[in-house]
Structures are given as structure tokens and as C-alpha cells.
Amino acid sequence: MADFLFLFHSTLGVIQTRKALQAEGMTFRIADIPRQLHRQCGLCIYLSCPPGEETRWIIPGHTESLYRYEKNDWCCIGRFDSCGS
């Protein structure tokens, strides 16, 4: 298992991802975005899953970025455009 952190372009992305994760019975946590990752306030989703499965939860246009916890730090492994980009 690996730990992942999803950031979103808006609250709508958090809600849609939460619904998708709940529908599949996944264990996750919604929390404030860590300050070291983003200056603005907002919500993120923490998820533990087997490596490779995290991409299943990326929602095009809503997921802003994806981080993986490696060597005691969050490493960005992907950035994504918003719906309006």
C-alpha cells in the first residue's frame, strides 16, 4: 500500500471524488490541505491504496494534483488542468 494525497480545483472535485470512493467502499480521509503543499486553504483527500490504483480516482477537470508520500515527504506525481483550461 502507498499513501496518496489528492488536491482539487474546487470543492466540487472533493465531493465527486468522495462519492466515487464511498460507492466503492474505499477508506479515505478528507482534511485541510497541508500548508507545505498549498498556500490557499482548501480540502484534500488522503487515500491509501496499492500503487497504480490511485489513477482510478483522478477526475478529469476536477483533480488538480496528485501526491505520493515518499521518504517522509509528499512528492507531486501529477498535475492536471481544470475544466475551464
Image (tube, rainbow, N blue to C red):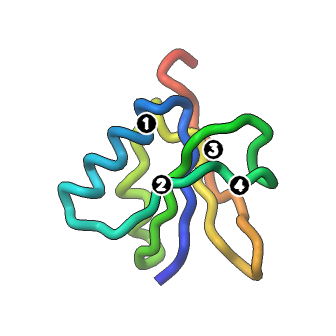
Left or right: where 79 falls relative to 49: right
Left or right: where 14 falls relative to 65: left
Residue 28 location, x and y as percent? 40, 65
Name which of mark 2 and mark 1 comes first in the sequence. 1
Residue at 20% across / 61% down in the picture? 24
Q: Amino acid at mark 2?
A: Ile
Residue at 81% across / 54% down in the picture? 36
Circle 4 sits in a helix, a strand or a loop, which is it? loop
Residue at 63% across / 44% down in the picture? 79
| Number of the front mark, 4 or 3 | 4
Q: Where does label 1 land, which residue?
A: 13
- Figure quadrant of the C terminus: top right
| Number of the front mark, 3 or 1 | 1
How far apart are labels 1 and 4 at the CA level?
17 Å
Q: In the orientation shown, which residue stands out farthest toward the left?
A: 23
Name which of mark 4 and mark 3 comes first in the sequence. 4
Name which of mark 3 and mark 1 comes first in the sequence. 1
Q: Where does label 3 land, which residue?
A: 79
How far apart are labels 3 and 1 at the CA level?
14 Å
How far apart are labels 3 and 2 at the CA level?
19 Å
Tell me if label 4 and label 3 are in contact, CB under 8 Å: no
Q: Where does label 4 land, which residue?
A: 34
Q: Amino acid at mark 4?
A: Pro
Q: Where does label 2 land, which residue?
A: 30
Label 3 crowd bin: few (<14), some (14–19), many (20+), radius 10 Å:
few
